Image (cartoon, rainbow, N blue to C red):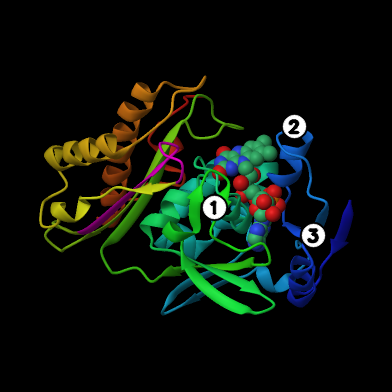
């Protein structure tokens, strides 16, 4: 195996152009190889020492998150917790403290698991991924990035350098919840993220919902635009649950049947919208929602 360490972006892009695969925290790539899921690539370039990819940059346009920003940083960053709370909820649920300290947002996004926790929050925020190669750079919406389980539309020589989130309108709140059977070292059985903006009278201005682990990729729930103008009450939450359950296309496996996942994702979507609306109204619900509201595993 050929292993190199890049300390600059140019070094990493040169290695990628020569066929190397990037490794950031290694918590998917290396752990997966050790577990026998897939062998390590022939050529690997470590990117974790590229300082320029480790920053969060807030501006009036929104938030730029360097690809190497870890889940531990995201769950405690004031801007993420305050304005992009669903992403903090998701990062706070990833693995264990040690997983969150090495696992990066870029790695989670580029690994493209349908069960990735940050995916649904990024989708409801309309995130774009910045991809760079020796030939130049481009931005891709996350919905166009994920093409299947473990597959993206990125080329082999493209490195994810940052994830960009647009700024949030006043009156907005968001939340991510997942069904889990135990509290740590567990991936989502199903999950849902919601982003909502409310008018001063509490009516819905806009609502986005996305689902985890019920399709080959993270999926957005269609039809939530028809809920604009309504109050967030039991009737609206029931409509959200019905939309989510009807659009999910889950599989059955040893963790849950297709029917159970379809039902539970409606419950998760309803809870995510409820928590997002409560946050939009100014209620303080600590990160992650799962622990604050007792969703998922009890201990
Ligand atoms: C015990 C354990 C528990 C876990 N729990 C969860 C969980 O609850 N939820 C969850 O979502 N995930 C979980 N994971 C998976 C993993 O921790 C996350 O997906 C993490 O964010 C991956 O980041 P990384 O930097 O370690 O990725 P790496 O393993 O370094 O890379 C993952 C993939 O992305 C590619 N890649 C990495 N960085 C870039 C880049 N900048 N540009 C292009 N391609 C890149 C790599 O080539 C590789 O294919 C868990 C893992 C372990 C070991």
Res. 95 visible in picture: no
Task: Give the distance between the C-alpha atoms of the residues marked 1 and 3, in whole angstroms.
Answer: 24 Å
CA separation in Å, label 1 and label 2: 27 Å
Near-viewer residue (258 or 188): 258
Residue labelled with disc 3:
46
Which of the two discs, 2 and 3, labels the residue nearer the N terminus?
A: 2
Q: Position of residue 8 (x, y in %)?
A: 78, 74
Q: Residue at x 54, y 45 (%)?
A: 92
Query: What residue is rendered at 28% in x and 34% in y?
Result: 245
Residue 3 placed where, x, y %? 87, 57
- Secondary structure of residue under mark 1: helix
Q: Are marks 1 and 3 in contact (CB under 8 Å)?
A: no
> Which percent across, then down, holds residue 47?
76, 63
Q: Which residue is mark 1?
A: 75
Residue marked by disc 2: 35
Does dot 3 land on a helix, a strand or a loop?
A: strand
Is 154 on the left or on the right of 271, as rendered? right
Which residue is drawn at the image coordinates 30% and 32% (left, top)?
267
Marks counted in the figure total: 3
Q: Give the camera-side residue of 268 and 128.
A: 128
Q: Quadrant of residue 197?
A: bottom left
Q: Is residue 162 left or right of residue 274?
A: right
The disc, 1 or 2, on the residue closer to the chain's N-terminal end is 2
Q: Nearer the viewer, residue 17 or 10?
A: 17
* Crowd rating for badge 1 (residues with CA inside 10 Å; few <14, some 14–19, many 20+): many
Image: magenta residue range? 206-217
Is label 1 or label 2 in front?
Answer: 2
């Amino acid at each position: 195996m050929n292993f190199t360490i890049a300390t600059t972006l140019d070094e990493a892009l040169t290695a990628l152009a020569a066929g190397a695969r990037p490794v950031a925290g290694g918590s998917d790539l290396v752990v997966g190889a050790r577990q026998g899921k897939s062998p390590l690539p022939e050529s690997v370039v470590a990117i974790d020492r590229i300082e320029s990819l480790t920053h969060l940059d807030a501006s009036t346009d929104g938030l730029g998150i360097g690809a190497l920003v870890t889940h531990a940083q995201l769950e405690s960053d004031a801007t993420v917790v305050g304005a992009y709370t669903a992403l903090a909820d998701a990062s706070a649920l990833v693995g264990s403290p040690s997983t969150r300290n090495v696992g990066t947002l870029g790695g989670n996004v580029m690994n493209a698991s349908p069960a990735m926790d940050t995916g649904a929050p990024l989708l409801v925020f309309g995130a774009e991924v910045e991809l760079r190669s020796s030939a130049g750079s481009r931005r891709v919406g996350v919905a166009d990035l994920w093409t299947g389980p473990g597959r993206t539309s990125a080329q082999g020589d493209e490195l994810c350098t940052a994830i960009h989130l647009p700024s949030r309108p006043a009156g907005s709140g968001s939340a991510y919840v997942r069904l889990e059977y135990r509290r740590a070292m567990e991936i989502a059985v199903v999950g849902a993220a919601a982003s909502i903006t409310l008018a001063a009278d509490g009516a819905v201005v806009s609502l986005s919902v996305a689902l985890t682990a019920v399709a080959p990729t993270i999926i957005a729930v269609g039809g939530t635009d028809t809920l604009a103008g309504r109050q967030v009450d039991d009737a609206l939450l029931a409509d959200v649950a019905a939309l989510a359950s009807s659009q999910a296309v889950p599989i059955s496996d040893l963790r849950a049947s297709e029917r159970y996942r379809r039902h539970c994702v409606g419950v998760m979507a309803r809870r995510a919208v409820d928590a997002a609306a409560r946050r939009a109204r100014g209620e303080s619900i600590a990160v992650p929602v799962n622990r604050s509201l007792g969703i998922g595993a009890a201990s």
